[in-house]
Image: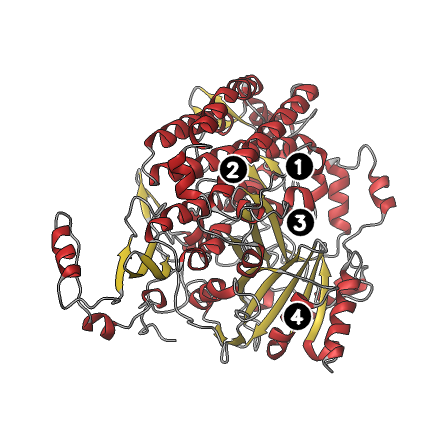
Amino acid sequence: VSDAEQPPKASAEQTHGSEAPQGPNPPADEAAAAGADGDLPVRLGQERLNAPVVRTGMFGTHGTPDTSGFGLLRVHRAPLLDSPRPYGSYFDVVADALGNALQADGLGFSDAVEHVVADRGELTFYVRRERLPEVAAKLRDDPELRFELCSGVSGVHYPEDTGRELHAVYHMLSITHNRRVRLEVSVPDADPHVPSLVGVYPTCNWHERETWDFFGIIFDGHPSLTRIEMPDDWKGHPQRKDYPLGGIPVEYRGATVPPPEDRRHYS
Amino acid sequence: MSSGMPHAATGATDAEAAEGRVYTVGGEDWEEIVAAAQSEDFESGERMVVNMGPQHPSTHGVLRLVLTLEGETVAEVRPAIGYLHTGIEKNMEYRTWTQGVTFCTRADYLMPIFNETAYCLAVERLLGIEDKVPERAQIIRVLMMEINRISSHLGGIAPMGLELGATTIYTQGARWRERTLDLLELITGLRMNHAFIRPGGVSQDLPPGALDAIRAFLDSSQPLVRRLHALIDANPIFVGRNKDIAYLDLEGCMALGVTGPILRATGLPWDLRKSQPYCGYETYDFDVPTVDTCDAYGRYLIRMREMDESMKIMRQCVDRLAARGAGGPEKDPVMIRDAKIGWPAALSLGPDGLGPSPEHIAHIMGQSMEALIHHFKIITEGFRVPAGQAYAAIESPRGELGAHVVSDGDTRPYRVHLRDPSFTHLQAVAAMCEGGMVADLIPAIASLDPVMGGVDR
């Protein structure tokens, strides 16, 4: 699918922004209204049509043997980029507590956190990378926050998001308060440096090595940032989007099955 | 940070390794090593670096340990992993959301049902259909998870005995585990790698006779449990090898991200089934066993007691399913009633093998054009998942198993990451074993119960 057929991103976000964002707690009357026949297919179909999505490219197949007519249909709901207050659930408490904890160090909330997204019952802080260790230390130590457990790092590669290609995603768990929060840091491909969190959460040691191995994100201050899954002399970072999956065509009873990368794909 | 640097786990550069004396043990040459260690030019207090694994009967899989020994004391231990890396996460980016189940089930091969459930819960959260998954499917999920929890715990306890040289513990445990695998096979058709839990529900309803088979299993398990308890609990060798070994307290668990039976052996009753329930676990009656010994023996006890709790939950599932009566796509479905998401075909065994049921074929070919289109679309393209990300965590037999799933609105996952407990727990080996005896390394690793399929993915 070429760029021209992509849904216009800005308008998609506007569409989504103008609709009431689906907060973590849907209103109670909505659930009640669903009632006995709430999960009937016809009703679900109606819900889907009302959902804030963009549908483009319904017709017009080019360069593909697909003749089903809907090959380029894209049903796209842009991800939330910024959530307005209140976030709902315990999210406001966490955001306020983090703001207060940072304030005590003379840091403004927006100095450390670029924006906040509360989507599908999960809270994400998009943290500026230079402030990551401070934010993590506050999350761990502040009595109102107490995120004792870090579930490690997960990398995501967005090659089309210029200047923010590589993301490191941390999931934190507070056993004291039974809460979860996600930290996300984005760095450009040309300067893939993120401060290491091993000093705050020692469990990040192997997770950061894995994210370096698979995505090439360099965690500054890590005690020994070496490959962990791939062999030491491996070239490249396999989970990046520009790294091919590989595979060979397989012949079976006269027909040839192409490798997964070359199979027809509906986007 | 280039690829030219040596592996950190080896703890020495190539040059240093070349300077020291290197002995390659090839079998039947132990005399030579002993003679070298006793020779005059071997200074007392000199450290010996020993490579253990990746092919070793006591490392619980293809785990490699680089040990630095001072006599029989472990000065340093560095686990080296990656020998079973198969690119499961990368592969999932090239298949549909439903096909992804087939890949993630192979990650930690002792708990396939849990891998599937974590992934499916994340996909369901992205789709916003968490509360629309049919109740019958949720009961079957809980039932399958608890059967799998028993088979996984037995897959941890039985080799724990074998690695200490107690073959009987292994054979008794494996015998009981075989019974749980029979149940899984009866219900899903496979002993492992089931791909049974799917986004929106489960792939099919329980086959006829499944409830009776589970009841028979539950009724006949008690003697086996008793026998295992009688064999192990007070066995002086087992107790001697495991008690006060591999100590890891609450503080250590928190710092190293350790969860599951290891965390509960420090006395903290943290179980995601209780604290952050999913699949309706809040409606089941069960306890979270804890001990406060922080050692390998405590972890064994927790696993044994958790199997009792699992059987308690299984019994409740069976009762609920029996009360609901026979299911069916109209009456009591096991897949979400959304034609755009739910896999349409109820599978059945015909004369030419497993395939869509004759009723379904008749419906799409002769009765409903819309159903035919839905069938065609969902099988060729799959469904699209709204852009965003979700993290679903469940209490697996080994601890918190998380699935971080990212979608860009496509018919295929943009990124799937499994936060595997075995991977995280192996980091704790150094904290538990350094300063101890080399022989204690074996029960320490067995008490972590790492599964390399999940570690390397």
Q: Is residue B438 left or right of residue A77?
A: left
Chain letter behind tag 1: B
Secondary structure of the residue carrying tag 2 is helix
Q: Nearer the viewer, mark 1 or mark 2?
A: 2
Closer-to-camera residue (A226/A246): A226
Marker disc for residue B301:
2
Which residue corresponds to mark 4? A126
Mark 1 crowd level (few <14, some 14–19, many ≥20, 10 Å Cα): many
Amino acid type of the residue tagged 1 in the rendering: Ile
Residues at marks 4 and 1, CA–CA distance in whole angstroms = 34 Å
- Name which of mark 3 and mark 2 comes first in the sequence: 3
Amino acid type of the residue tagged 4 in the rendering: Tyr
Chain letter behind tag 3: B
Marker disc for residue A41:
none
Query: Which quadrant is the N terminus of chain B positioned in?
Result: bottom left
Chain letter behind tag 4: A
Which residue corresponds to mark 3? B125
Secondary structure of the residue carrying tag 1 is loop
Secondary structure of the residue carrying tag 4 is strand
Residues at marks 3 and 2, CA–CA distance in whole angstroms = 35 Å
Q: Nearer the viewer, mark 3 or mark 2?
A: 2
Residue A41 figure quarter? top right
Q: Are marks 1 and 2 in contact (CB under 8 Å)?
A: no
Q: Nearer the viewer, mark 4 or mark 2?
A: 2
The image shows residue B318, relative to residue B130, as above or below, that is: above
Which residue corresponds to mark 1? B336
Mark 3 crowd level (few <14, some 14–19, many ≥20, 10 Å Cα): many
Relative image position of residue A162 (x, y in whole percent) = 56, 76
Mark 2 crowd level (few <14, some 14–19, many ≥20, 10 Å Cα): some
Residues at marks 1 and 2, CA–CA distance in whole angstroms = 39 Å
